[in-house]
Image (tube, rainbow, N blue to C red):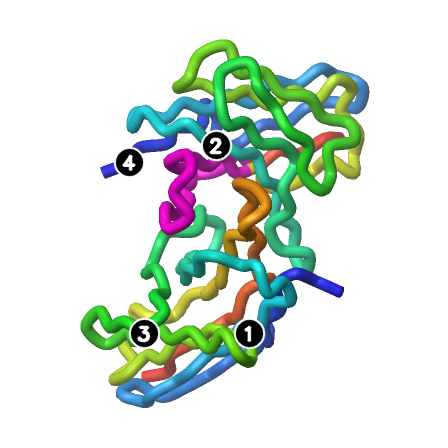
Amino acid sequence: DVKVTQSSRYLVKRTGEKVFLECVQDMDHENMFWYRQDPGLGLRLIYFSYDVKMKEKGDIPEGYSVSREKKERFSLILESASTNQTSMYLCASSLFASYNSPLHFGNGTRLTVT
Amino acid sequence: RKEVEQDPGPFNVPEGATVAFNCTYSNSASQSFFWYRQDCRKEPKLLMSVYSSGNEDGRFTAQLNRASQYISLLIRDSKLSDSATYLCAVNIESGNQFYFGTGTSLTVIP
């Protein structure tokens, strides 16, 4: 089974702090994704990466950056956390260039910014 | 216009009932389709992929209608444990982007 692991289940940070969310997958997947999920808005793509050191903006990249230094690890960075970034953050991975390859999600990080 | 739309529900059905959800997508270049199940405060988990010819997995049947641009999920003989939110997902041809519906809430009542 694919395992996608997010480093924290719950985080509480203060406004203005720099926040790192880490994600590791063990299935040698090329693609990795960061989503946030909010009630009524569903899952929204922040960034994705299809290779080491490659990144692409999703639908809501403002206020976020990412890092992919190793194939198995994809980090999401909130440069200066704000209260509107309070959300559930979900990391996911999938095989590259395989349209029938589904996303596999980590168990999520519930971030609260106060 | 949203890429993927679902009726949010809630659907409240008695045990043993058959329930169906639809999900419409706007991009005719969509290539692959999936249903996910999400329990409260947990991550989405893959329920099943949706193939062009339709596919079945036990009590669950998924179908794709490309002409009308929708996918469906049918659950037969509902169990209490089927209570969850069901998300549809669409992979667009142009990139490795997946678009999700906002989910349909199902509660199976004893």
Instruction: Choose the circle earlier in sequence order: 4 or 2.
Output: 4
Disc ID at residue B54: 3
Task: Report the residue marked by disc 1.
Answer: B69
* Inter-mark Cα distance, 4 to 2: 19 Å
Quadrant in which the C terminus of chain A appears: top right
Instruction: Choose the circle earlier in sequence order: 1 or 3.
Output: 3
Disc ID at residue A71: none
Instruction: Verify CB contact (< 8 Å) between mark 4 and mark 2.
Output: no
Q: How far across and down, in percent of the image, does residue A91 sit?
A: 49, 34
Q: Please state which of the two labelled residues, at mark 3 or mark 2, is closer to the viewer.
A: 3
B38 over A71 or under it: above or below: below
Disc ID at residue A2: 4
Q: Nearest the camera: A63 or B13?
A: A63
Is residue A78 one of those drawn in magenta?
no
Q: Residue at x 39, y 85 (%)?
A: B19
Magenta residues (range): A90-109
Q: How far across and down, in percent of the image, does residue B97 sit?
A: 56, 44
**Quadrant in the picture for residue A4:** top left
Q: Residue at x 47, y 65 (%)?
A: B85
Query: Can residue A106 be seen in this snapshot?
Result: no
Query: Can residue A3 be seen in this snapshot?
Result: yes
Give, as a three-letter code, the residue at label 3: Gly
Give the total number of marks visible in the rendering.
Answer: 4
On the same chain, marks 4 and 3? The answer is no
Q: Please state which of the two labelled residues, at mark 2 or mark 1, is closer to the viewer.
A: 1
* Inter-mark Cα distance, 3 to 2: 36 Å
Task: Report the residue marked by disc 2.
Answer: A9
* Inter-mark Cα distance, 2 to 1: 36 Å
Dot 4: few (<14), some (14–19), or many (≥20) neighbours within 10 Å?
some
Is residue A91 one of those drawn in magenta?
yes
Q: Residue at x 48, y 37 (%)?
A: A108
Q: Residue at x 48, y 30 (%)?
A: A32
